[in-house]
Amino acid sequence: MFSIDPNGLLLEANDRWFEMTGHPPNSAYNLSWMELFIDSNRGCMEEAWRRLSHDGMHWSGELQLKKPWYDPHTGEEVANWVLAVSHFQILFCSHCIHLFFALELVLMR
């Protein structure tokens, strides 16, 4: 799972997410996480981001990561498909409002 701000900047992610996606932990920029998916998924990801960030609507879909998965028994390279589920959350504190988005990637093997 990873969280992003309203500009699409990666705020945090767990170790498993970095391992699964291959995203470098210290090189985030706005929408850098979109680079993790194969080029043919780009339009789908842009639509998902628009729905989430502009329309406030949840989104889910199947996407393929650029980083392949290797079968531990055969060593065979396999397409790395994930189920992406997005949602947004607003947190209120005494002096500010935090708006962030989360995408969860579920491996599909």
Image: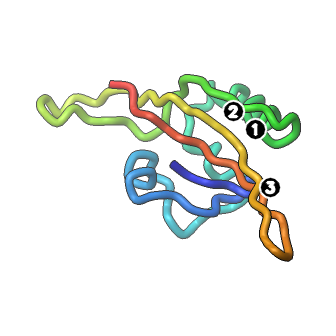
Which residue type does callout 2 highlight?
Answer: Met
Question: How many neighbours does mark 1 have within 10 angstroms: few (below 14), some (14-19), or many (20 or more)?
Answer: many
Rounded to the nearest angstrom, the CA distance separating label 1 from label 3 is: 10 Å
**Badge 3 is on which residue?**
7
**From the viewer's perspective, is residue 14 above or below residue 50?**
below
Q: How many marks?
A: 3
- Residue contact at pointers 1 and 2, CB within 8 angstroms: yes
Q: Nearer the viewer, residue 97 or 62?
A: 97
User: For the residue labelled by badge 1, is the local secondary structure a helix, a strand or a loop?
Assistant: helix
Three-letter amino acid code at the position of disc 1: Trp
Q: Which residue is mark 1?
A: 49
Label 2, secondary structure: give it: helix
- CA gap, disc 3 to disc 2? 14 Å
Residue 15, picture quadrant: bottom left
Q: Earlier in the sequence, mark 3 or mark 2?
A: 3
Query: Left or right: where does residue 11 sit relative to residue 65?
Result: right
Q: CA distance from mark 1 to mark 2?
A: 6 Å
- Residue 71 lies, in percent from the top left, at 21, 32
Quarter of the image for residue 98 reads bottom right
Q: Amino acid at mark 3?
A: Asn
Query: In this figure, which residue is indicated by the disc labeled 2?
Result: 45
Percent coordinates x, y for residue 77 in the rendering:
28, 30
Q: Which mark is residue 76?
A: none
* Circle 2 Cα neighbour tier, 10 Å, few/some/many (<14 / 14–19 / ≥20): many
Horizontal side, residue 103 vs residue 48: left or right: left
